[in-house]
Amino acid sequence: FVFGTLSLVLILLVSLIIVITKSYLLPVRIVSTIGMVAWAAYVVYIKREERFPASPTLLPEDEIEIAKNFGVSTIEDAAYVADMSPDALLKLSASTKVADLRRLSDIALSGGACERILHVARRNSSRMSSEDVQRRRSSQISIQEEFPVPDFAWDKVRKGSYESSFDCINTAFNGHGGFGGSNEPSVDWMFSAMTNDRDDPIRIEAFGSFLGPMLVVSETYGMILEVVDNDESGRTNVAASCACYPPGTLDSDGSTMKAGGDRYHFGLATYGLAPTFTNKEITGEAFVQRLAAFKQDSEWDQRRKDYGEMWYIGLLGTHPKYQGNGYGRLLLDVVSNYAQETKHDCYLECSGPNIAFYKRCGYDVMWKNEITIHGDSIEIAGMVRKYQA
């Protein structure tokens, strides 16, 4: 209204001057002068009021998505991991330039970022309230007591921990140590892009940093089962291990531990070593591409969330030295026994070459997905063992 009134007054004034002077020169000068003064006043006003934000304004969910790329949950923590100010990080994240996006990726996958993620994880875990710690311990104790080892397996199976199961799962999945046997095809597909030498210490460390937090979270929020056997010297070893989750114990997004969430930080802080598998300076570009495709194309978390409550088998591995003794099947039988008691299905994901084994154990394929990078493919399947009423 004000703008319209001023415009009308200005038009009438200019028209009156034209009628009186019978010339357009003076009105043009007046209008030009008014326009210049108005623009100058507007610029001064904008500068003084700081109407434009120093960095892009994002919705909370957008900030979380940016932070997840750095293994954290807030922009402030992401900026710390990236070693830059929050404003600089937001500007870089909002850019559409390929060079800026590439720089952002290189920063997130650097050695320095790995170390700073571990620092954030330790800091956030140390800030947990005593009530949260007690609640977590109570939940863990409750799961252990509610689901004892069934009678048919008591002489071979025991409840395990991430420390006792780590070497077994690490060796079973990566295939190092010269024991022969088979390893996990999906792990080999990813880490062979780094090196084909399974005994390479850097590859072993990188996979360990991927596996360690997962096992910590499995023990804390779910359950770890182990088969024990004696070697030639009579020493008791963990021959096979299974990390499983009772119904309702997965994270809110269907994952075992949400990226950048409290579970991941707790797992990382407890494991105690930086996640070197995210350090592109060590693993290389080809590995990073396969890891990203593996996570994105499979849509594991969303499929679990959509499926609803079930017994989820997150990890299952038999040490190469003990393969062929039926230990993997024995652990699956223990979990299916729990599932029968609670009247739930069992759910897992596996790579293509392992589908036949799980079918023999009573599982059916629910979905399949093929991931291809530069002509090299790996098949992933989701499999379910239905509750038998």
Image (cartoon, rainbow, N blue to C red):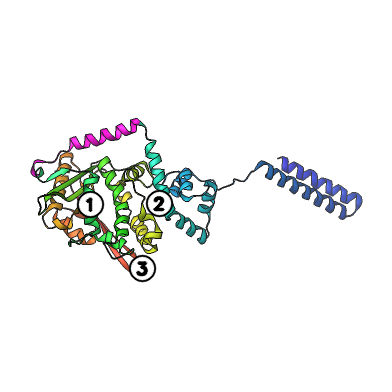
Which residue is denoted by mark 3 in the rendering?
Answer: 374
- Residue range in magenta is 130-152
For marks 3 and 1, give the one nearer the viewer: 1
Instruction: Point out residue 206 in the picture as x, y percentages from the top left corner.
Output: 32, 56
Give the side of residue 284 with respect to residue 340, left or right: right
Which residue is denoted by mark 2 in the rendering?
Answer: 114
Q: In this figure, what is the number of numbered marks? A: 3
The kind of secondary structure element at disc 3 is: loop
At label 2, counting other C-alpha atoms closer than 10 Å, the crowd grade (few under 14, some 14-19, many 20 or more) is many
Say which amino acid is labelled 2: Cys
Please report the residue visible at 40 percent of the width from the left and 39 percent of the height from the top.
Answer: 124
Say which amino acid is labelled 3: His
Q: In the image, which disc is placed on residue 167?
A: 1
The kind of secondary structure element at disc 2 is: helix
* 148 in the magenta segment: yes
At label 3, counting other C-alpha atoms closer than 10 Å, the crowd grade (few under 14, some 14-19, many 20 or more) is few
Instruction: Point out residue 19 in the picture as x, y percentages from the top left corner.
Output: 89, 50
Give the side of residue 253 with respect to residue 231, left or right: right
